[in-house]
Amino acid sequence: MEEPIIEVKHLSKQYNIGMDTAYKTLSESFTFAVRHPMKALMDFRRRNETFWALKDVSFEVKRGEVIGIIGRNGAGKSTLLKILSRITYPTEGEIILNGRVGSLLEVGTGFHPELSGRENIYFNGSILGMKKREIDEKFDEIVKFSGVEKFLDTPVKRYSSGMQVRLAFSVAANLEPEILVVDEVLAVGDSVFQKKCLGKMKAASESGRTVLFVSHNMNAVENLCTRAMLLNNGNIICNSYDTREIISKYLNIHDQSNKSSSWINNGKEFLNPWFTLEKIYFTDEFGNIVDDGHFNNKYNYYYNVHGNIRELDPALQVGYALYDEDNNLLFWTNFNDDKEENWPKLSKGKFCFSGLIPKRCLNEGLYRIEPMVSMYFSEWIIQPGVNAPMLYFEITGGLSESPYWLTRRPGILAPLLKWNVKKV
Amino acid sequence: MIEHATNYKLVIRSKYGFLDINWRELKEYRELLFFLALREIKIRYKQTIMGASWALLQPFFTMIVFTLIFSRLAQMPSDGIPYPIFSYSGLLLWTYFSNALSQSSNSLVDNAPLLSKVYMPRIFIPTAPCISGLVDYVVAMSILVLMMVYYRFVPGISILLLPVIILLAFLLASGVGYWLSSICVKYRDVKFILPFFIQLLLFVSPVIYPVNIVGVNLRWLLYLNPMTGLISAHRSCLLGQIPMDFVGLLISAVTTLIIFLSGALYLKHTEKYFADLI
């Protein structure tokens, strides 16, 4: 039996969450110790409230496994990665590593704005544990992957933020440790670049490296990982090779809190001079309120945003943003997306903006929908993903009339499209 | 493919032995120390008009001011050699030491992102500024050479000791830097104490005055400062006319080694908490 590449045994990490942990002045702790020597000694261990970021976590990883670590914010994922990469140390327990660890907890660590792209590649590479010789060998590949060839000798401070991130990731992606620890770096860059990054990780795992991967992107976890581990409150809830099951478990914990299908303003939220949001709800094709959030794909539904226009402003935009189960934004839509002549006439007073959720466009599954209210290009009143109230609906059944299409198909969307077939 | 043959094994746990130093790792990362120092050098004079000549101007103007005040006004003795070259030869090493020390002491806090996001031997961070400072030292040395030509000084055989003295100054700056930078992670007071501390240290170092200005029975007080022996020896070995104070140098060397080793161990001992505290 091959020995595991990572052995984690009864790992715990405690943090102090008291006020004065980060900054203590010398004189404060000094005078305190002089005045109350006994108390200082006794207090030393239990002065602050403590909190266990990880509690008695044990697991083993075999060579070549790709493990997705999922869990809500504060579940202990990042702490685990930090201990694995020796940034912080455990309070109890130990980890035995039988291979070199390269960690990517944040891209671009150590990038210096004054240095050129070229200089930063070398510096960043060596911080990540690469030898100069290795960087020399991979230099062209790194540059090519990042796509900043033209600006190699420009100080990084003149780069756009996207370019900086791309360059940083390209350096990191060329690391070749036996164990690769990655934290959420895929959340950066545009989608083309994200795809490149995922490809790079896949290649890493295919070449036999062991990868530990923390992410909120369930698609990525499902596609990349051979095994998943769900953390909650510092404990491993489950850990198995059935990544799909673990993901759905995670989503269930995630959504238990409030999966509401309507929302009413208690009168205190989103106060602004232009538009008061009053309530949001779903209706079906016939105007009946759908309050259980169950949709059948055979029918159209409407997302209704009720509000009071208090001051008329032509810049007012109302719309919605639609997300899938994995928090991917599917689209934004606004009531005034059409040409100007077709816009509805607004005036002061109460209005209901009903946005269509078209039938046979989305796939079966759970969706989240958020209102969007803004003053065009100047101010957000309700910003999706930031402060918007969330409503959920679930589509089941009614995918098509075809006997060949009865169950959920792969893909985010499942549109029923018209086909022209003729003899040629 | 990766060779699976590497017998790399590492245990991460909460407590390590007192002298548990991972030499292999220090060796493996040694290029990083070079890159850290190189980065310091490259960014230090970025976006300045004068560039690296600041390394010259700083000690040069201090020398002029010292000469005007201490030599002309206060009639300070200078071991029988012209005061400008006397003070410059002291200032040269002093400037290196004080700049290296202050950058080294702030280095851990200034590089907080490195501490909280990536692993590397922490000891390199406060060491790097002490290495990059050597470049400034060499640049500033050019003025001393010109002055030596002007005043017709020829270094004697003791010039061979110069590398040892520079090494000791480097170890001392790093050692104090290890102590102060680790303490600074927890107690930011260091930032405020430091400039003041360095200023005071100048007055108990034989930069402005020669050691023998202090009576023999009080001289030990001066030797408490490890820079004393180093600055005197530095001057003797460069200028050749002043006899080398071997006792002073030996005292400094011993103190320096103690400070360096204890500092390195203290940093090693506290580095576990850096990421949590910074």
Image: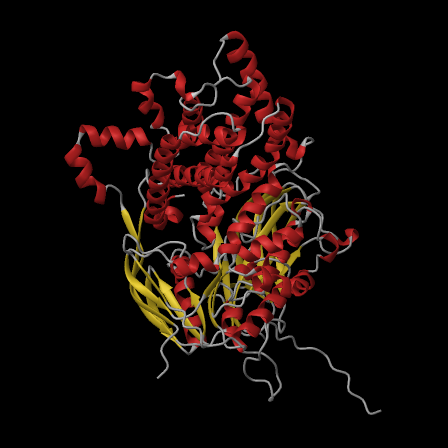
Please say whether residue A198 is visible from this viewpoint. Answer: yes
Residue A333, relative to residue A160: is it above or below?
A: below
Q: Position of residue A171 (x, y in %)?
A: 59, 60
Q: Position of residue B43 (x, y in %)?
A: 61, 41
Q: Position of residue A302 (x, y in %)?
A: 59, 62
Q: Quick one: A284 or A12, which is closer to the camera?
A: A12
Q: In which quarter of the image is the C terminus of chain A?
A: bottom right
Residue A90, relative to residue A57: is it above or below?
A: above
Give the quarter of the image for residue A167. bottom right
Please say whether residue A110 is visible from this viewpoint. Answer: no
Q: Quadrant of the N terminus of chain A?
A: bottom left
- Tell which residue pokes out farthest to the bottom in this image: A423
Q: Quick one: A265 or A244, which is closer to the camera?
A: A244
Give the quarter of the image for residue A405. bottom right
Q: Give the residue drawn at x 45%, y 45%.
A: A266
Q: Is residue A72 left or right of residue A200?
A: left
- Tell which residue pokes out farthest to the left in this image: A38
Residue A314, relative to residue A104: is it above or below?
A: above
Residue A274, relative to residue B272: is it above or below?
A: above
Q: Where is residue A23 in the image (x, y as percent from the top left)?
A: 36, 37
Q: Quick one: B171 or A217, which is closer to the camera?
A: B171
- Tell which residue pokes out farthest to the right in this image: A424
- Tell which residue pokes out farthest to the front in this image: B157
